[in-house]
Amino acid sequence: MRIATITNWAYGGTVCLTIAAGVTMVMASNADRIERDAVRQRDLFDQLAFEVEADEAQLTDQARLAAVTGDPSHEIAYNHTLAAIGPVEQRLSRLKDNGAKEEELRSLEEGLRWARTLQDEQKAAIDAIKRGDEITAHKIVFGAEYERELERVHFLLGRFRYMLDQRSDRAIEQASQASQRLRTVSEVMVGITALLFLFVLGFVLKRRILKPVVKLSDVVNRLADQDYAVEPPQLSQIDEIGDMAHAIRVFRENGIERQRLERERDADWHVRDLLARMTQRLQGCESVADLFEVVRLFAPRIAPDLSGRLYTLDARLGMMACASEWQSPDGSDAAFAPDDCWALRRGQSHMPGGDLVDVPCKHVPPETAAATVCVPLTAQGETIGLLVLENRAGLQGPSNNTKVYIELMSETVGLALANLKLRDALHEKALFDALTGLRNRHELADTLRRGVAQADAARTPLSCLMVDIDRFKQLNDRFGHDAGDLTIRSVASTLDNAAREDGTAFRYGGEEFLLLLPGCGEDRAVERARLIQERISAMTLVHDGVPLGPVTVSIGISTYPVHGPAHALIGSADAALLRAKEEGRNRIVLATGRRDTNAAAAAEIG
């Protein structure tokens, strides 16, 4: 029962008991009034009875004195007393007005009747005195009959008083008993009211309010300090305190949920900060290897429960090759065909362990398929990679929040990977010759500068070989440009193979090529030039079924610092190549160095 209902009932009961107690007190007071009226009536009736007796005694005395003395004054006093008494009807009316009963009135009337008889005898005695008959007067007022009548009057008046006393005593006793009962009832009601008040104080205030409120107060104080680990008391009572306890439980649950949301928000901000940092690092990557390292470091922190691998498309093999992995995922990291992954087929994330039944990918082990999600890396509508993530915490895929982070990470990684590949492609186009695959003249200056610096630091020579295909214009005019391109590609391949171990080959322009050989002196440079000539001469080129004939090259060689300063190294090799062509082609000519010039000058002087 609710406290308000209990309080209302208690208040209503208290009011009712108070009213009943008041009514009982009024009734007890009325009984007391009845008792007082009974006493007052008895006193009045006694007074009337005593007045009658006194009057009769006085009349008797006056009549006897008149009979004994014969003094007329006693007659006058007798007449005066008789006139003062008044008629009997007046006395009876006074008794009726004061509540005398018929039985009592009959007893009084009988007494008064005998009193009138006495008065008649008294008058007769006085008349006898007036006639001078004293003996008759004495016989009348002093006779035995007169005494018996006088006693009878006293007896009847005494019986009247006795009846009055009996009735008054009964009335007083009844009124007293009624008053006592009513007072007892009133006291009982007051006691019940007090007990009800004490019950309200003890049961409602202490048990139903004070104890629960003390418990709830402690809980509220701890909740105010955001201590949501506190357990609110389980109050089964259906009242205001129960409503308060329910509200506190709801507040605690809301606080716990708010803390959870705050933790999720903080975790979300942390992950978003990691994603932002990862994006910044990806933008600063200089190579695909840098990108793979960034992904390997940041992915476990963005999704701690997920292990995974990053696959990229190997265009040469047409296979997805594992480029990076983290947190030791299950299964093999072997390359697989793009068609083995449903994510790559569909161009969107694929998770066979979700709520809906789906087909697992062939490259994922069956025992971990339900906990694996594949996310394609796309950029500008082209699939360039794949993220394969495995939930280590269970047999289900990642949570919805983690899926969002994975999508953001995949978009970031895909875009960065596409940018790196695009930059590599642009770099390759800018630095490598499209026909031969050799480095072009844009890369030559930087490579030469680095080679010279290394040579100066290590005090080693640096040789430059300038190579030109002999009679290329005639071959091109005779067999066409396609045959010329075939010849250029074949010569470039031979030069690239010859320089791969310790040098770099460049296409200098047209049919001219250049080789930089760090740490290679004049003698080794000549040996390398002869090897190149031999390999080129040994080539058999056929275009559209037509042999192109033997191909020869002329080579000019210059070595730093023997043949001059670094800025003149290419010029010296080009001058040597020009002399080789002038001397008949298919030749190797060393540049003229400072030592040769000094020797020639000395010979001329000699």
Image (cartoon, rainbow, N blue to C red):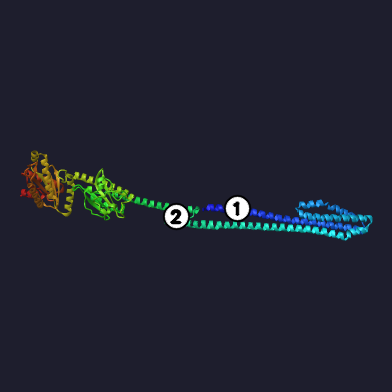
On residue 16, the disc is 1
Dot 1 lies on which element? helix
Relative horizontal placement of residue 533, taking residue 396 as reference (left or right) = left
* Residue 359 placement (x, y as % from top left): 27, 49
Regarding mark 2 in the picture, which secondary structure is present there?
helix
Q: Residue at x 51, y 56 (%)?
A: 208
Residue 223's disc is 2
Q: Residue at (42%, 53%) from the top-left corner?
A: 253
Q: Residue furthest bottom?
A: 144
Indicate the position of residue 602 as horizontal and vertical percent values.
7, 50
Left or right of 292 on screen, residue 32: right
- Is disc 1 surrounded by few (<14), some (14 to 19) or many (20+) residues within 10 Å? some
Residue 419 seen in the current view: no
User: Where in the figure is residue 301, as x and y percent of width and height?
Assistant: 31, 53
Residue 8 visible in the snapshot: yes
Type of the residue with mark 2: Leu
Residue type at the position of mark 1: Cys
Q: Residues within 10 Å of mark 2 (few under 14, many from 20)?
A: some
Q: Would residue 257 be found to the left or right of residue 15 on screen?
A: left
**Is 70 drawn above or below residue 538 in the view shown?**
below
Residue toward you, 596 or 43: 43
Q: For marks 1 and 2, give the CA distance.
A: 44 Å
